[in-house]
Image (spheres, grey):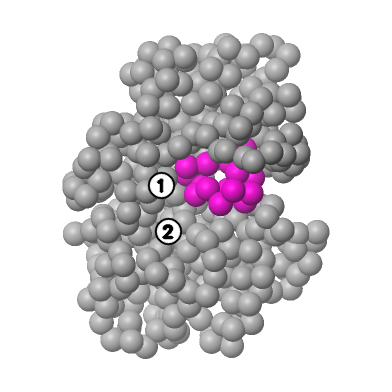
Amino acid sequence: MYKIFNNTKDDHEVETDLLDLTAKFDAKKILILTGQNSFSESEAENFLITELKDKYTKANFYSDFENNPKIEDLTQAIQKLRSKDIELIIACGGGSVIDFAKLLKVYLYDAGSILDFPSKYKNPSKSQISMIAIPTTAGTGSEATHFSVLYDNKKKYSIASDHMLPDYSILNSSICLNASLKIKSSCVIDAFSQAIESFWSVGANLESIKFAEKAIHLINKHIDNFHINHKDENVMSDILLGAHYSGKAINISKTTAPHALSYSITSFFGIPHGHAVGMTLGEFFIINEQLASMNAVNCRDLSSHMLQMKSLRELLGWGDCISCNDKWKSIMKNLGLNMQIKLNGGQEGVINRLADSVNTERLSNNPISLTRENIIKLYLNIIS
């Protein structure tokens, strides 16, 4: 069985099935957006064939874009699809697939707003297309957020609009089971990182903390043995729901410094997103407590921030900030996610380029402000 959530009504679970849900939109032209290989490998194809029946055979299909999609991917898709009169997008895939679908949702019939990206573009102000998001990985929570990412010359740009939020999310753990442990590990670390970062984010509020707590509870109880039990559908069901809640959390609070540092790691070294985030996250248990001072905070209230960090550590049950960092490194090791990048020379130049490319918006959400020296030190910890 699968769960359907109405994203526009406080994440309300809906008692229906996919066929009836698509009928609700009365869409004559449906676009099914998928990954190039993951769609059939994940059993998602069989799921949609079974659920959609003749609507599946009548749909348009598109998968001609890369992971971490570039502006060239988007403009090409708009050229190929804008004459199709698409009314409903069903995005079935990982975070890149769902992110790309959100971009098409708002820009397919408003291509002028994305011209001259990234020097000059408009955040979308409307959408004529409805959207259902079906994640095939338990990680990004993209099905529950109103932002997307787009790359230009290896630099990541975040685009945000309430009109990009998918109307509905469908969570089906059975189509998440066939991915490799490497993919699952990167995805679960992304979800866990999002929930943790949301908890300490400057933008956190009572609602985002509620979602972050749910996500942390669901993921933390499985994380130690996930490398062993990742094919257990009950485990994957919890992880998938946890990832969804982590998406709901960052949809409010946004992510923080570990995400800000990760985008360059992914662009420069091809390391999957969640893995890249996890390479620095552990250090922030220490940074966000031990570097805290009145002269180095982005948050409004230092004492409240320290209490929030204490609450997070108690929720995780990992001990003090140093023990939390050690525990995080242990989790990464168990999942087979390497914490080191080996270079054959040129370390200083590479690290300076990485530091120059850090996402400043996400960095400002971190409760403790970072100097360039702090950033370089963090990169030096993982690059040799």
**Residue ID for mark 1:** 187
Could you tell me which secondary element the residue under label 2 belongs to?
loop
Q: How many marks?
A: 2
- The answer to which of marks 1 and 2 sits earlier in the sequence is 2
Task: Pinpoint residue 98: horizontal percent, then vertical percent.
Answer: 47, 61
Task: Pinpoint residue 256: horizontal percent, then vertical percent.
Answer: 58, 34
Secondary structure mostly seen in magenta is: helix
Circles 1 and 2 in contact, beta carbons < 8 Å: yes
Q: Nearer the viewer, residue 224 or 25?
A: 224
Task: Pinpoint residue 162: horizontal percent, then vertical percent.
Answer: 57, 55
Looking at the image, residue 64 sits to the left or right of residue 151; the answer is left
Which residue is drawn at the image coordinates 52% and 75% (left, top)?
Answer: 64
Image height of 100 relative to 239, above or below: below
**Residue ID for mark 2:** 94
Span shown in magenta: 260-276
Which residue is drawn at the image coordinates 56% and 82% (left, top)?
Answer: 81
Q: Disc number at residue 39?
A: none
> Residue type at mark 2?
Gly
> Residue type at mark 1?
Cys
Q: Choose top left, top right, bottom left or bottom right for residue 192.
A: top left
Image height of 105 relative to 309, above or below: below
Magenta stretch: residue 303 in it? Answer: no
Q: Nearer the viewer, residue 288 or 327?
A: 327
Q: Label 2 neighbourhood size at 10 Å, few (<14), some (14-19), many (20+)?
A: many
Image height of 40 relative to 183, above or below: below
Residue 290 in view: yes
Q: Choose top left, top right, bottom left or bottom right for residue 108.
A: bottom right
Could you tell me which secondary element the residue under label 1 belongs to?
helix
